[in-house]
Image (spheres, rainbow, N blue to C red):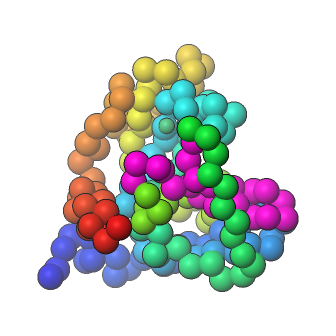
Amino acid sequence: MATPTQSTQAAFTPLTGGCRCGNVRFRMEIAPIITHCCHCRLCQQATGAPFNAVAMIETRHLLVTDGKLSHFQGVKNHKRAHCADCGCVLWVHRQDLGDVLAFVGVGVFDQTDRLQPDAHYFIRSKHPWVTLPPDVPAFEELGDPGKAGVRERIVAALAVR
Ligand SMILES: [Zn+2]
Ligand SMILES: [Zn+2]
């Protein structure tokens, strides 16, 4: 069945990325479901950064091309996929969504110019000095930024859990 998602995937050039030491390398084969910045307190605490910029993708479209990922399930936290040698976190799995969806930190990609946020979430806890661009949808908590195919891809991914 043809979906809007599949038609937009045709022209996508895969993104590559890796950890700080270079031992783990991966390729993201298709465009992420959505790229967003989360300003929630959990993300702020988990990353130590004012917000967490991530690309959400079906985990099966992340191909580890070099090295081996290790996983760490913290208490009250997301499961982290990281390099055992340098500790760099490449992506996380949310407990409520499971391992079928991954949230890849946009900073670990080689092509840092290719992914731009489709939305900002949980801006109610945004650090006051962070200024958001006026043309990107921003929500107090969660919300629908109106990007095609988002709901369909999430539902399809969760269906195979
Ligand atoms: Zn490493
Ligand atoms: Zn968050």
At a point 75% along the width and 56% down the height, the residue shown is: 88
Quadrant including the C terminus: bottom left
Inspect the magenta stretch and tell me whether residue 85 lies in it. yes
Q: Is residue 41 left or right of residue 144?
A: right
At a point 53% along the width and 62% down the height, the residue shown is: 114
Residue 108 can be seen, yes or no: no
Percent x, y of residue 103 = 51, 55
* Number of numbered callouts drawn: 0
50 and 72: which is toward the camera:
72
At a point 23% along the width and 48% down the height, the residue shown is: 146
Position above or below: 63 against 100: below
Task: Determine the residue located farthest toward the front in the rendered image.
Answer: 75
Which residues make up the magenta segment?
77-97
Residue 132 can be seen, yes or no: yes
75 and 58: which is toward the camera:
75
Q: Is residue 108 left or right of residue 156?
A: right
The quadrant where residue 6 appears = bottom left
Position above or below: 15 against 1: above
Percent x, y of residue 58 = 42, 67
